[in-house]
Amino acid sequence: MVGSFKLDRRRVKEIRCGKMTELACKKCKYIGSSGVCKVCGSTDFSKTWYGYVIIIDPEKSEIAKKMGIKYAGRYALIVS
């Protein structure tokens, strides 16, 4: 399928059980679970974020262009 992706069953279980803490970078809004942002290198993260968009091909994505996203990944819509 074009534009589809597959989640690991273990990861889905961790997310459902609340064992996984998804953090959003306050600078670029990239969603990850580590202490350093893979996109901008910032260490300023928030646990409070709302909505997200998955960017697969930032060069062709109008949403990515409007949000200023240059790398594929998951990005929060609102970070507080």
Image (cartoon, grey):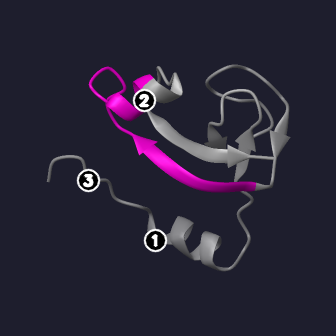
Write the residue at 47% across / 20% down. 70
Front position among marks 2 and 3: 2
Image location of residue 1, percent across then percent down = 14, 53
Marks 2 and 1, Cα distance to the nearest angstrom?
A: 28 Å
Q: Which mark is residue 47?
A: none
Q: Disc 1 versus disc 3: distance between alpha carbons?
A: 16 Å
Is residue 49 depicted above or below 73 in this figure?
Answer: below
C-beta proximity under 8 Å, tags 1 and 3: no
Q: Amino acid at mark 3?
A: Ser
Pointer 3 residue? 4
Lower sequence index among marks 2 and 1 = 1
What amino acid is found at the position of numbered circle 2 in the picture? Ala
**Nearer the N terminus, badge 2 or badge 3?**
3
Determine the residue positioned at 62% across, 36% down: 30
Magenta run includes residue 56: yes
Callout 2 touching callout 1 (CB < 8 Å): no
Q: Nearer the viewer, residue 59 or 40?
A: 59
At 47% from the left and 47% from the top, the residue drawn is 53
Q: On the image, numbered disc 1 is attached to which residue?
A: 9
Residue 15 in picture, x, y percent from top left: 62, 70
- Asked if residue 33 can be seen in this view, the reply is no
Residue at the extreme front of the image, as rendered: 66
Identified by mark 1, the residue type is Arg
**Tag shown at residue 64:** 2
Q: Secondary structure at mark 2?
A: helix
Q: Nearer the viewer, mark 1 or mark 3?
A: 3
**Residue 59 part of the magenta-drawn span:** yes
Within 10 Å of disc 3 (Cα), the crowding (few <14, some 14-19, many 20+) is few
**Residue in the image at 26% along x and 53% along y:** 4
